[in-house]
Amino acid sequence: MSDDEQDWLAAFAPANTELPAELFTADVVRHVRRRLWIRGAVLGAACVLGVVTALGPLYNLFELVSMGLGTVALQWRDTAWYMQYGLPLVLLSVGFAWPILVRWLAR
Amino acid sequence: MAEDDTSDEELVAQVVAAGDTVAFETLVLRHQSKVRNWLRQLTRDPARADDLAQDTFIRAWQRLRTFQGRGKFASWVMKIAFNCFLQARRKPDYGPAVELPERHGDVVVPFLESPDVEKMLAMLAPDERHVMILCYAHGMSHGDVSEVLDLPLGTVKSHAQRAKAKIRERFRIEAPETRRARRG
């Protein structure tokens, strides 16, 4: 480094004096922790509210699915059943298979 | 608290991975003085500068995932501080601009007896002032300054040269060659 550069650094050194850190740092960290707490509380409350709101519909859905599964278990050998629900079955299969299909096409 | 020899990048990784507030506290402890001084020089108001510095670190905490580790953490946080300052300055309730000091006499002075930093800075254009503060008060390289101010490297270098020439001319500071000749 040249003498000139050192002179400029020396001249500007008073503009970067060390400032006391403790109070400022404690303030910043307190703010950050408070934000974390608020975020956690809001997320927790949202989860609880979501579960409570969805409880009724979830119960209905569970009932419907278990009924459907019962029907499938009893009638899976019956070919007429496949003909009756052909379109939903095809859509369901496509729904499950499309990620594999897309990956295969991309390759 | 995290160990002192832990690098900034390692501390950032700890904060990002586990939300480690102690690692973040170490980062704040390390860089608070630099950031607060930078904002004090920009705002010329210590209270406002500290408020902006607090905003800077909270913003840094929120955006820590975006720190890629390509540049230095210090430059990254100084850039956030500069953006905080620019945003605050755009608000209508922001205070008056910096006043220029009175013109110095025509006495030639050796460099180290030159006028105080405030007076030197106040006579420069904003970009030149920012470059001089970062280069010489904070000892940052031209590359780092160009990152903080979002200016091309060549522009940073020319701002530094122009600022130095202005200060020398305005305060009648001897050029390095003259000084060397006088010393010799």
Image: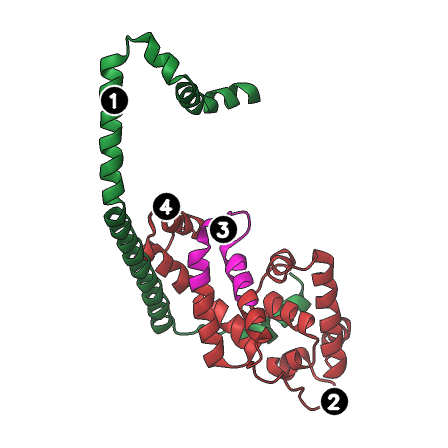
Chain colours: A green, B red
- Assign the N terminus of chain B to one quadrant of the image: bottom left
Question: Nearer the observer, disc 3 or disc 2?
Answer: 3
Q: Amino acid at mark 1?
A: Leu
Tell me the quarter of the picture where residue B88 sits: bottom right
Question: Nearer the observer, disc 4 or disc 2?
Answer: 4
Q: Amino acid at mark 3?
A: Phe
In the image, residue B131 sits, relative to residue A105, either above or below, namely below
Secondary element at tag 1: helix
- Assign the C terminus of chain B to one quadrant of the image: bottom right
Q: What residue is shown with label 2? A: B107
Tell me the quarter of the picture where residue A96 sits: top left
Question: Nearer the observer, disc 3 or disc 1?
Answer: 1
Measured as percent of width and height from the top left, residue B123 is found at 69, 81
Q: Residue at x 28, y 12 (%)?
A: A76
> From mark 3 to mark 4, how far is it between C-alphas?
13 Å
Q: Which residues are magenta?
A: B58-82
Q: Is residue B66 left or right of residue B167?
A: left
Secondary element at tag 3: loop
Q: How many marks?
A: 4
> From mark 4 to mark 2, how far is it between C-alphas?
59 Å
Measured as percent of width and height from the top left, residue A69 is found at 25, 22
Is the same chain shared between marks 3 and 4?
Answer: yes
